[in-house]
Amino acid sequence: MIISHTNILATKLYLLDNGLKGTNFNINPQFFKKITKIDDGNYKIELSVSIKNTKTNPFPVEIEAIFETTFNFKEVENEQDVDTFLNVNAIQMIFPFMRAAINSLVSAALMPPLVLPIIDVRQFNTK
């Protein structure tokens, strides 16, 4: 199987300072994925991370990051290999860019560092 992708594009980076003070906050990011078949051999994957301030889990900022990329598959012998790649390997490729973008976004806002934890990519829920 031959795999190529065009780019990794940040389609949304959102930061809102909720003005909460303190140091005892628990980060509770929500991870989502959306895989779309464009046509034979071409798939778009969209990953999003959302951190919200809620009554049950207060957090000083709200953040949303959405990234997407398109993959092209040639000489596919087994469709299960494509599915596995899109649900595991592709997310492993894109996630470090999301982590870095969120860290940079928070740093550019002159806020304390915020680094997403390293996760098992199977934690991404389907949108």
Image (spheres, helix red, strand yellow):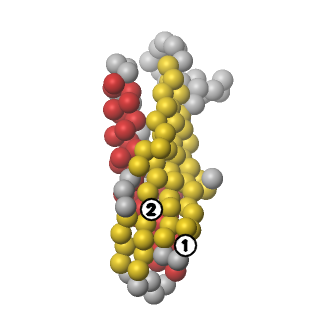
User: Looking at the image, do the residues carrying marks 1 and 2 touch, with CB atoms under 8 Å apart?
Assistant: no
Amino acid type, callout 2 = Thr
| Foreground of the two, 17 or 2 | 2
Q: State the residue at coordinates (38%, 42%).
A: 99
The secondary structure type at the circle numbered 1 is strand
Give the labeled residue for mark 1: 39
Can residue 51 be seen by looking at this rendering? yes
Give the labeled residue for mark 2: 70
Q: Is residue 58 above or below residue 63?
A: above
Label 1 neighbour load within 10 Å: few <14, some 14-19, many 20+: few
- Residue 106: which quarter of the image? top left
Q: State the residue at coordinates (44%, 18%).
A: 23
Q: State the residue at coordinates (58%, 26%).
A: 53
Q: Residue furthest right?
A: 55
First-in-chain label (1 vs 2): 1
Question: Where, quadrant-wise, is the N terminus in this rendering?
Answer: bottom left
Label 2 neighbour load within 10 Å: few <14, some 14-19, many 20+: many
Q: Is residue 86 above or below residue 63?
A: below
- Distance between the Cα atoms at labels 1 and 2? 11 Å
